[in-house]
Image (tube, rainbow, N blue to C red):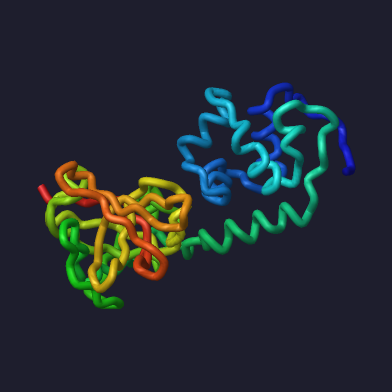
Amino acid sequence: MAVMSKPPIDSPHERLVWAREQAGFGDKADFARAVGVNPTTYRAYENGQNGFAKYAALFARRLGVTAEWLLEGGSTPAISEAIKSHAKAEIEDRYPKFEETDDVEIQQWDIAYGMGAGGYLDIPVTGETYRFSESWIRQFTRAPASKLFFATGTGDSMSPTILDSDIVLIDTSEHEVRMADRIWAAAYGQAGIIKRLRPMPNGSVKIMSDNQSVPPETAYDGELHVVGRVVAIVRKM
């Protein structure tokens, strides 16, 4: 492997930061999503708060370095242009740029997602279109407006996180459940649901409610279709 002059990186977390930036992931959250790790959890690895030995091989493979170098140091590797191009393409594919405007239009779909037994799902159903400032939307997601929609939650199984008739913002650019326990809009059978989803080692997905009185369910192959991730909750006062 080609080497270059050694930058001032003397600890595993400093090497991780350096390799991530050299590979083209300017935003640590982008890299966390690319490897399927919760961004908050990943941030602690780069801050040196937690060790990341269990993820070293995964991180190294994606960054074009070795796990040994990340954890122990040595001659600093050169990150290949192929790795950088892959990272750039992945970020641009997941998060295309907003058009140069102060406002974006987002549809509110005329559909209810059940947070109990589940509401009947028949998508796509379009409703009204609303305009929002780009800066407000970017608090929750970097996805383009065409990948976002608002919908209404019904029921109380996600209480107290989401209440009956709360409006949720759903990001359809995220539809792979790679991080456990986030909240997703999905179709389970013929029902539309908003639940926390947890991928299990056997390939199934555990469907969980925040209301502790509602027992979890498990979806197997072909039973669950993920529509998008819930990135914001709007509550009427």
Q: Is residue 175 left or right of residue 94?
A: left
- The N terminus appears in which quarter of the rendering? top right
Kindly indicate the quadrant of the structure image that contains residue 123.
Answer: bottom left
Q: Answer yes or no: is residue 146 visible.
A: yes
With 21 as the anchor, is 182 left or right in this view? left
In this rendering, the answer to whether 233 lies above or below 78 is: below
Q: Please count the marks in the image.
A: 0
Any part of residue 143 in sight: no
Is residue 165 positioned above or below 45 on the image?
Answer: below
203 or 36, which lies in front? 203
Q: Residue furthest left?
A: 237
Residue 201 picture location, percent across and down = 47, 50
Residue for point 46% across, 54% down: 202
Q: Is residue 211 above or below residue 13?
A: below
Of the pair 94 and 52, the residue shown nearer to us: 52
Q: Nearer the viewer, residue 147 or 15?
A: 15
Q: Where residue 56 sits in the image (x, y, percent)?
A: 65, 37
Q: Is residue 84 left or right of residue 98?
A: right
Residue sitting at x 76%, y 39%: 66
**Residue 143 % position (x, y):** 45, 59
